[in-house]
Image (spheres, rainbow, N blue to C red):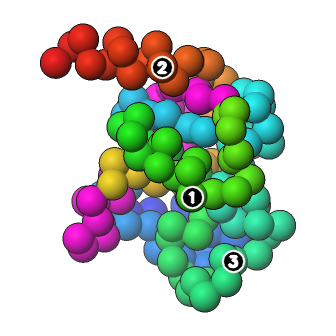
Amino acid sequence: MILDVQEMKKRFPAYFENFTLPECAREQMICVYRACKTRKIEQESFLNTYEENGFANTVDQEIDDPQEYCLSTYEKLRDVKRFVALTAKYSPPFLLAKGWTAPSCGVSCRTKDWKVRYKSSHVDWWLYKDAKPWEHFEEVNYEEELERFSKRK
């Protein structure tokens, strides 16, 4: 879904004018995990990177990089665990939430569908104004989820 500038102004926060969404971004439901830094399923644990950084871009990142403005989620448990291990603000124990990229909250796509040589199960989710993505998630126990997942194979 390619949105023109006027449509983006209506649906997304003003800072979305800084970049162009990847062509694969669309309203869709993808089952994903999110590490909640506040250890609660709430708004503060579901901020996009730009908002989480105090409405600033990450050091050494380009202002027009769409990934700077997405809510990061993962399809695979191992990838969310690796992310938590590499990011100090998510020090254990962390709360693991599982849910869906709800179309009513914004557009999403798998990072590997638009970034060359990307191997992770990362899913970028660009949220509409006033979206409440946390309403589409519930807490899950990492060990139980891992066990449940391994039994399906």
Q: CA distance from mark 2 to mark 1?
A: 19 Å
Answer with left or right where residue 66 lies relative to residue 117. Answer: right
Where is residue 27 shown, x and y percent of the image? 41, 42
Measuring 68% from the left and 38% from the top, which residue is drawn there? Answer: 92
Pointer 2 with pointer 3, Cβ within 8 A: no
Compare residues 73 and 140 and report the one nearer the observer.
140
The amino acid beneath tag 2 is Glu
Question: Could you tell which of marks 2 and 1 lies nearer the N-terminus?
Answer: 1
**In the rendered structure, which segment of residues is drawn in magenta?**
95-119
Q: Residues within 10 Å of mark 1 (few under 14, many from 20)?
A: few
Q: In the rendered image, which residue does mark 3 sit on?
A: 57
The amino acid beneath tag 3 is Asn
Q: Is residue 6 magenta?
A: no
Question: Could you tell which of marks 2 and 3 lies nearer the N-terminus?
Answer: 3
Q: Is residue 106 magenta?
A: yes
Question: Could you tell which of marks 3 and 1 lies nearer the N-terminus?
Answer: 3
Q: On screen, 91 above or below 70?
A: above
Measuring 40% from the left and 51% from the top, which residue is drawn there? Answer: 122
Q: Quadrant of residue 35?
A: top right
